[in-house]
Amino acid sequence: MTTDNPFVGYSDGEIDTNPSTATSLNDLIGQRYSRRATLIGGLKGFTVAALAGTMLAACDEDTPANNQQPTADAGADIQAVAGSMVTLQGSATDPDGTVDSVQWMQTEGPTVTLTGANTTMASFFAPAVTQDTQLVFSLRVTDNGLAVVTDEVTVTVSPALIGFMAIPKSLDDVVTVPDGYSVSVLYALGDPIDATTPPYSNNGSDTNFDRRAGDHHDALYYFGLESGGAPDPGNSQRGLLVMNHENITESYLHANGPTVTPDGRRPEAEARKEMLAHGLSIVEVSADNGWSIDRGSTFNRRITPLTPVDFSGPVAGNALLVTQYSPDGTEGRGTINNCANGFTPWNTDLTCEENWAFYFKRNPATDNGARSAKEITAFNRYGVTSTTGNYGWVTVQTADPADTSFARWNAEVMGGDATQDFRNEMNQFGWIVEIDPYDPASKPRKRTALGRFAHEGCWPSLFIDGTKPAWYMGDDNRNDYLYKFVSDTPWSAADADGTGLAVGDKYLDAGTLYVARFNEDGTGQWLALLLGQNGIGGGGAYPFADQADVLTHARLAADVAGATPMDRPEWTATNPRNGEMYLTLTNNRERSKPIEAANAANPRHYNDPNPGGDNFGNPNGHILRLKETGGSSEATSFEWDIFLFGADDSLDADNVNLSGLDGSNEFSSPDGLWFGRPSNISGQGFPLLWIQTDDGALTDQTNNQMLVAQPGTVGDGEAVTITNEASDGTTRQQGTFVGKSADDVNLRRFLVGPAECEITGIDSTPDGSAIFVNIQHPGENGGPGNITSNWPASQGGGGAGSRPRSATIVITKDDGGIVGY
Ligand code: FEO
Ligand code: CA
Ligand code: CA
């Protein structure tokens, strides 16, 4: 398959003999003497003589009649692993004169770029392969009498495999990685993003969070930057990191934890700090003198819940988005609870609004009377039911009475109509937001065509010229769904050179939102969420007014269409080699998933007891994968299986530990998910899949962790029937499809984080030599008087008494190679 993903350096695995067949004058002459002279030797004798005579005259050189041929030795055949540097060590002599030139040429195998091709010692990086593949190189030696000889060497390249030793589980308060790797802390909570903001004192006294790193670092993406400030997707030395700050650990942000005034209000300064610690960071990073933030960069900025944003797509301007701040429903303020992410090939970031519903205060007992039945249905389905709102921000009495930064989180009917209050403010959240990191003045754009729910991730399909691209999105809620947005616009590779939100308007404002139904036989359908299709109409429990209503209430439309309830859909990732989509389903507890609710795609119901007691349902989660029919992002049907089941390795292998995990790779609650970039070996051949956990079930044995897998394809395992067991002793049989078992070759533990953290967010430089990983909320259960983690201060030893901070780390391989091998 040919892809137009701009990050693909070459098309691996396809046997492509060297296309350089143009024959030069010297080639023709040289081949007269070559033991492999095929061209001239195949011609009639007089033609050869005439041709050679003409050419030699043209060269104006004479060949001594008694010249002896030089020698060429291309060396012994070589075995190499994909991604490694291969050196071709040849030799050349001339018994009666001098060697005039040497030249290496490739004659067979996937084309590589040779360094030093005009010397006896040439080198190249072994390409990605999926099976042992031969590359043949010819060393051609020409002497000063123009005699030419050649010799060949064969290099057999084998697939690259995970190359580090799995690390053990750990409860230590540090980030642990395998031998041969190094960790450095790049960007921690409170770090200033400019040269004038003071360093972080980390004692609760710091302010100015719109010029500091936010809290709870989550998904991130590396955008290469050229010296003039333009996008340079291949640059592994300098780039912009775009990073989500999903939430806060409120207790550590203040000197003595959060406070309330005697009349029960949150102090404005505290609440403002908390709000500004949400959002995103865009920071310039460079590899000069080790990875660091360039605090002088004009690209550095924070996007917060107060940053002005625009709405775009079918819901922009709809009455559902009208607020006191935006009477025409086209603008809004900021983004919140940004969890996973996605990207576009036109160099923009997609950030996902996840658990926004809990930030709003809406007391049903007092507000329902002012609401329609439809509105109440929507509030209940989206969970806008908190009577306080997160962190009590709505209680703030602002010094400036006109400042509605806090009042906006009150979603109750307060004024005469929607332009006089924030009754619709909650409709402004739950979207995919596109951000142009290269234009610090650009306003983020909320792409309403991609639907509104608890957006976890938004990872794209492959980009194939002439085919409509898709983005895959999980809705992280118990028993909620997997979605796909397919653009109306076929991909044009020329748009990879474009930048910015105008290109996003072309691809992300018109398209079809689908939801997934997983059948018991391993197939599935994408159900279009379009008014008038799949039962979505103007009647029933929620009569949809128009397509804007369908998109704003995508969950309700998906309910009607018959989507499959899932065990909390988290991140999506696309295998860059074959386009298969992977989805983490982090867990689902018994209270919300009774045994009868198991289905083939969410098949397990069992007990994973831990020191806290029984733990029924699917406490360890699984990773599903999906293969579109015909491999097309436009497909409306697919096949699926379950790539891996999380489990404690002591659990029943026939019904629970279905992937055969052992101590070297057992994990629970997969969440973050990311394939190596296709611009280096980790996204080619057998790409590496990185799995991050946000777990509470295996945490008696280990802190949260990150593993590396090398997956096969959908269907590489088998159909199984398991016996589920509920807490009341009920048992029930369930069929499913499990992928090839895990083993020490295809799944290893790479990293364990510090105490009480979640591992989330990962990307690499395009060359794969450095990965950026986020450590979120270490010590989250503690507070100023009870500090439960000292990370990152503890990373180098010590740090006693230090408050924990979410932070981005950089991991490099000590030999400079690609991380993971
Ligand atoms: Fe923010 Fe579903 O994790
Ligand atoms: Ca000679
Ligand atoms: Ca997450």
Image (cartoon, helix red, strand yellow):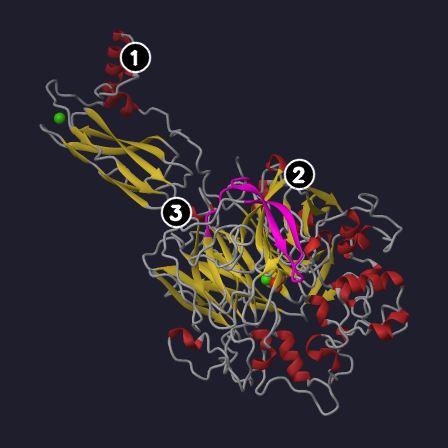
Q: Position of residue 650 (x, y in %)?
A: 48, 59
Residue at the location (78% across, 82% down)? 401
Q: Earlier in the sequence, mark 3 or mark 1?
A: 1
Badge 2: residue crowd in 10 Å (few <14, some 14–19, many ≥20): some
Badge 1: residue crowd in 10 Å (few <14, some 14–19, many ≥20): few
In this rendering, does residue 348 appear at all? no
The quadrant of the rendered image in which ligand 3 is seen is bottom right
Q: In the drawing, what numbered circle is on residue 439? A: none
Q: In the drawing, what numbered circle is on residue 161? A: 3
Secondary structure category for the residue under label 2: loop
In this rendering, does residue 538 appear at all? yes
The residue that disc 1 covers is: 42
**Three-letter amino acid code of the residue under disc 3:** Leu
Magenta residue span:
709-738
Q: Position of residue 223 (x, y in %)?
A: 52, 56
The residue that disc 2 covers is: 635
**Three-letter amino acid code of the residue under disc 1:** Gly
